[in-house]
Amino acid sequence: MLLTSEINLLRSEVALMARKAMDIYDQSVQCLASGDEQSVARIRAADSELDTMELNLDQRCMELLLLREPYAIDFRFVFSAIKITRELERVGDQSKSVAKWSLKLKGAPGPDMMELAAKAREALDTAIQALIESDAKLAAEVMQIEFQVDAIEDRIIESAPGIAEAFIAKALERIGDLATNIAENVIFTVNATDIRHGQYENPPEI
């Protein structure tokens, strides 16, 4: 069936964009330790490619909605893909911010910052796996990881960091938020349930 093949192609292209966003994130975290200007330039170029992917996928999604009239889970996936690609593009933007501010660091990042980077990566990686596997249960795990991301960022901010550290911490925390947004869209696609705005307000003890 033509629609099925086009939906599968869209899934593959969104997954490719997600992996590229993860790669950009990993490069930005490496910049925290290296402070390498050439690496920052490469991240900027890769982020530009991510922008182009978002535009192309938005166009593909609009064509599918208008011309193929998908329904049920196919409609929810295409509808969510428009939002997910936007979140992935923002992951690139925030990663670029991490890389840019890494050049302003005075010395190596502290253990709290590296813990925050690792936890934000865990949130993003889990969200991407949930997206690729259409796994709502895995997506729900992202919410719990994000509570931990927030707690670590709070700890860093309360320690009165320098300007560069504060901007990096905020960008990493924001990447955790974007991972949560991706996960929410996965849950909507799979379960037809909208869990935005408060479903996970009360975290467990951590």
Image (tube, rainbow, N blue to C red):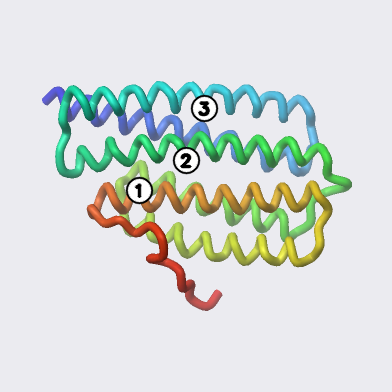
Looking at the picture, does residue 205 appear above or below residue 195? below
Mark 1: amino acid: Asn
Q: Secondary structure at mark 2?
A: helix
The N terminus: image quadrant:
top left
**Residues at discs 1 and 3 in contact (Cβ within 8 Å):** no
Give the crowd class for mark 2: few <14, some 14-19, many >=20 residues within 10 Å: many
Tell me whether circle 1 and circle 2 mark residues in contact (CB < 8 Å).
yes
Q: Residues within 10 Å of mark 1 (few under 14, many from 20)?
A: many
Gap in Å between the C-alphas at discs 2 and 3? 11 Å
- The quarter holding residue 95 reads top right
Image check: 157 left or right of 61? Answer: right
Circle 3 is placed at which residue position?
50
Res. 114 image quadrant: bottom right
- Seen as rendered, the residue at the extreme right is 106
**Residue 10 sits in which quadrant?**
top left
Residue at horizontal 87 percent and vertical 47 percent from the top? 107
Q: Where is mark 2, residue-wise? A: 87
Which numbered dot is residue 185? Answer: 1
Extreme-left residue of the structure? 1
**Residue at x 63%, y 22% (from the top left corner):** 45
